[in-house]
Structures are given as structure tokens and as C-alpha cells.
Image (spheres, helix red, strand yellow):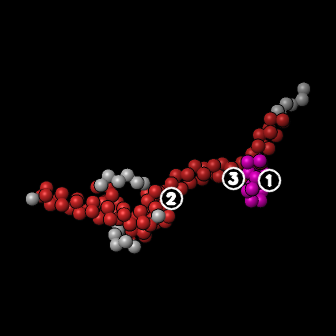
Amino acid sequence: MSRATNSPASRKRRKRIIKQAKGFYGNRSRLYRYAKDALFKAKTWATRDRKTRKRNFRSLWITRISAAVRGRGMTYNRFMEGLKFLNVDLDRKALADLAISNPAVLDELVAQAKSGLEAKAAAATKVSA
């Protein structure tokens, strides 16, 4: 009796892996053995880098806000502290977008943050006295 290898299913499985590896460099896109390993690594890194991308964007937004606020005579830390005291709920992405596209609104927010810091200082002296 001849040996059954389930050839159609094996070929389909290998073809699927090769198709997913399209665009990879060299043997990684042409040979099953290397394509399989390359895809495993690619999926692993994609999972890791979805988390990293969030970190990178948050860092970029903070840098943009900091640069815009420093130009208006304030530090990022004090700016965020003043906004938090006034319960201004704008996330960093929105603030960074405002810093680039609408500087007039950012000027108003900086003024509000300064007044919020003054109010916070006044409240602290009132409590300690």
C-alpha cells in the first residue's frame, strides 16, 4: 500500500506561509524553511512594537508640548500641573495638535495654567496659615 502524505494540505500550508512572507528579503520570501522563521519573528516583533509605538507617540507629544510651552515662558511640568488643578481634561495628543495647528488657543491655555498655579499657591498658603 502506498504511503499517504496529505500532500495537498501540506502544499497549501506551505504556500500560505510563503504568501505571507511576500516582500521579505532573499530566501526569507522564497523558501518555506526560512519564511516560517521570518514570519514567527515578524509577528513577535509586531506584538512588541504595538506597545512601543504608544510609548514613542506619547514621548513625541510631550516633546512638542514642552517646546511650545517653553516658548511662552513656562515648563511642561508646571503647565500640566496648572491644567490639572483647573480640571482641564485635554490629553497630550490634543495639546500637541493645538501647539502645532492653533497657537492662539495654546496661549490661552498657558494663561489659564499660570492662573491655576497662582490659585494653587494661594490655596496652599491659606491651608498652612
> Is 60 in the magenta?
no
Amino acid at pointer 1: Arg
Nearer to us of marks 1 and 2 is 2
Q: CA separation, marks 2 and 3?
A: 27 Å
Q: Which residue is mark 2?
A: 57
Under tag 3, what secondary structure?
A: helix
Mark 2 neighbour class, 10 Å CA radius: few under 14, some 14 to 19, many 20 or more: few
Under tag 2, what secondary structure?
A: helix
Mark 3 neighbour class, 10 Å CA radius: few under 14, some 14 to 19, many 20 or more: some
Viewer can see residue 78: no
Q: Which residue is mark 1?
A: 30
- x 66%, y 48%: residue: 40
Q: Quadrant of residue 74?
A: bottom left
* Sequence-first disc among 3 and 1: 1
The quarter of the image holding the C terminus is: bottom left
Please identify the residue farthest to the right as the structure is shown: 1
Amino acid at pointer 3: Ala
Q: Position of residue 59 (x, y in %)?
A: 46, 61
Q: Are marks 1 and 2 in contact (CB under 8 Å)?
A: no
Amino acid at pointer 2: Phe
Q: CA separation, marks 3 and 1?
A: 11 Å
In the image, the segment drawn in magenta is 19-33
Q: Which residue is mark 3?
A: 38
- x 43%, y 57%: residue: 92
Q: Position of residue 116 (x, y in %)?
A: 27, 60
